[in-house]
Image: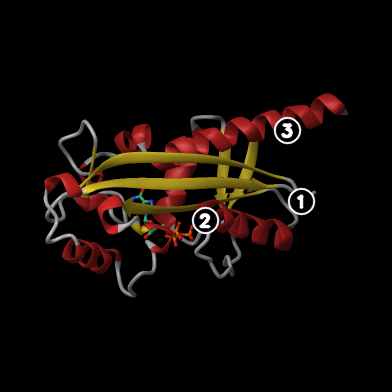
Amino acid sequence: MLRTVIIATGNPAKFQEIKDIMGRYGIAARMSDIKVGVREGTLSYEENARLKASYVTARLGVDAFGEDSGIEVPALGGFPGIISARFIKGTDSDRNSALLDRMRHLGPSDRRAVFKACAVITFVNGAFVSGYGELSGRIIDGPAGENGFGYDPVFVPDGQGRTLAQMSPREKNDMSHRRRAVEAVLEKYVAYLKDGIDRK
Ligand code: ITT
């Protein structure tokens, strides 16, 4: 493995996906031992991802990775978006029900949705790199599937006949917003490291 990166997340399912994706690039991922004590804002995914990563970098003095993501329904003005994890208290299943409730009156063409993710790696010297990814699809009428987490049971990606929760972790990681964001940030991370090595 080229390097170990500390992942600033409190979500074990998200961590596992990031670890699997990073493994494909020869980078080892380790979940942060400290609780990421940041208050997420409502401005941008990148800002929140950077807050999470820089918290760990500041506390532990290491490069750290943070990711912020959400699902947006254009027919609901982009809701729940950046507040996807917390627009109501409760479980993932409670939030799925609440989202389906708000979409009950919408016709098929208004059920479009997009998962978005921004990944950031912060460096001890204050620099950072970021990458962005999205996955388009639609919200179905009721949950299906047991895999994944969050909104996976109600989301069918474009060109697919199954929800993300009905897919294997590998199938999801082949197409997900997270995969794209992690790939994009790692490309910049590896270039940044190489640049540092070249200059030595
Ligand atoms: P952190 O500790 O990393 O912040 P979190 O679960 O709170 O973990 P976010 O703040 O980034 O993560 O919130 C992301 C929200 O979007 C959360 O409700 C997820 O369930 C949902 N979400 C993001 N990516 C998803 C995916 O791949 N599948 C299903 N739901 C997803």
- The quadrant of the image that shows the N terminus is top right
Q: Element at badge 1?
A: loop
Dot 3: within a 10 Å radius of its alpha carbon, few (fewer than 14), some, or many (20 or more) residues?
Answer: few
Dot 2: within a 10 Å radius of its alpha carbon, few (fewer than 14), some, or many (20 or more) residues?
Answer: some
Q: Position of residue 124 (x, y in %)?
A: 76, 50
Q: Element at badge 3?
A: helix
What residue type is disc 2 on? Ser
Report the Cα–Cα distance between label 3 and label 1.
Answer: 14 Å
What residue type is disc 1 on? Gly
Query: For the point 30% across and 69% down, which residue is it?
Result: 91
Q: Position of residue 52 (x, y in %)?
A: 59, 59
Q: Position of residue 61 (x, y in %)?
A: 75, 56
Which residue is label 1 attached to? Answer: 126
- First reached walking from the N terminus: tag 1 or tag 2: 2
Which residue is label 3 attached to? Answer: 193
Q: How is the image coloured?
A: secondary structure
Q: Element at badge 2?
A: loop
- First reached walking from the N terminus: tag 3 or tag 1: 1
Q: Is residue 3 left or right of residue 41?
A: right
Which residue is label 2 attached to? Answer: 44
Q: Is residue 160 left or right of residue 197?
A: left
What residue type is disc 3 on? Leu
Report the Cα–Cα distance between label 1 and label 2.
Answer: 19 Å
